[in-house]
Image (cartoon, coloured by chain):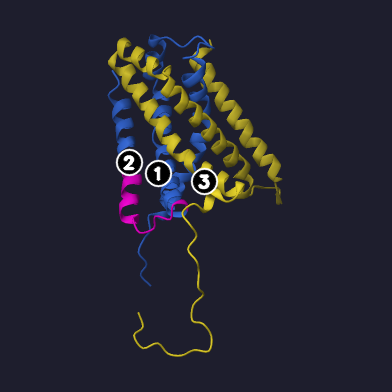
Chain colours: A yellow, B blue
Amino acid sequence: MNVTPTYTEFHPRWYRRRPTTWWWLHKGAYLRFILRELSSLFIAYFVAVTLAQLYALSRGEAAYARWQAWMASPLALVLNAVSLALITYHAVTWFSLAPKAMVVHLRGRPVPGTWIAAANYLAWLVASVVVAWVLIGG
Amino acid sequence: MTRRRSIEPLLWTLFSAGGVVAALVLPVHLLLFGFAFPLGWLEPPSYQRLVGLVHNPLVRLYLLVVCTLPLFHAAHRFRYTLYDGLQIKHLNELVNPLCYGGALVGSALAVWLVWSFP
C-alpha cells in the first residue's frame, strides 16, 4: 500500500464491484455455462464407476454381480441419468466448438466450420457404434 | 531473459485430449452400462465375455486412455469452475493440488488395475 498517496487529477484505478458468488444464476446463458463446467464432476464420477467395474471384473463373478446390482439401484440410476445428460451436453458443446478451436486448410482454403463439426459428430457416431458392437455384437 | 517454465500448456493439452475422449466414448458407455443393461433394454455381455475383452491388449490400452485422460480434463475444468464460478481464488494452493492430485491418483489406480488384471 502506498502510504503517501500522490494527488492525481484522474482516478488511479477503476472501482470494480465484485460479482456475487451466484452470478451464474442471473441469466440462462451463464447457467448453461456452469452446467457445462459441472459436467467435469460427472466425468470423474463415471471414470470412477468404470474403475470399480474393472476392479469387480478382476475379483470374480460374484463381485461383478454386485457391481451390476449397484448400477441397477435407484441412487446409481439417478446419478447416471444426471451424468448422461451433462456428459452428452459436454460432447455436443465440445464438437460444436471444434471448428473454432481448429481451422483446417485444404488447398489453401479454410474448410467450412460446419464440415469440421460434422466430421466430429461422425467420429462420435462411429466410436459409439464400435464400442457397442464390441460389447454386444458378433 | 530467464523465464520459469510453466506446466500450464501441458495441463491445457491434457484438458483438451481428455475432453475429446470423454465426448467420444463416455456417453455410449453410460447409455449401455448405466441404462440399457441394468434396465433390461439389451442383453448384457456375460462376465466371461467382458473378462475376455480385458485380456485383449488393444482393449487394455483403450481402458487406460479412457480411465486417465478424462480425469485430467475433469480436474482442469473443475479447477476453473471453482475459480470463475464460485470465485474461490484464495484457495488455489489447496484446490489445484486436490484436483490434479486426484487425477493422478485415479490414473495410477487405472494403470494398476489394467496392469494387474488376472
Discs 1 and 3 lie in a common subunit: no
Residue drawn 35% across the image and 59% down it = B90
Residue beneath label 3, please?
A: A34
Asked if the residues shown at circle 1 and circle 2 are in contact, with their CB atoms under 8 angstroms apart, the answer is yes
Residue at x-position 39% and y-position 26%: A50
Residue pointed to by mark 2? B102
> Label 1 amino acid?
Ala
A23 with respect to A112 (left or right): left
* Contact, mark 2 vs mark 3 (Cβ under 8 Å): no
State which tag comes first along the sequence, 1 or 2. 1
Q: In front of the other: label 2 or label 3?
A: 3
User: Which quadrant would the C terminus of chain B be assigned to in this image?
Assistant: top left
State the residue position of label 1.
B75
Mark 1 and mark 2: Cα distance apart in space: 8 Å
The residues tagged by marks 2 and 3 sit, at their Cα atoms, a distance apart of 21 Å
Q: Is residue B6 magenta?
A: no
Q: Residues within 10 Å of mark 2 (few under 14, many from 20)?
A: some
Please give the range of residues in magenta: B85-101
Chain designation of label 3 = A
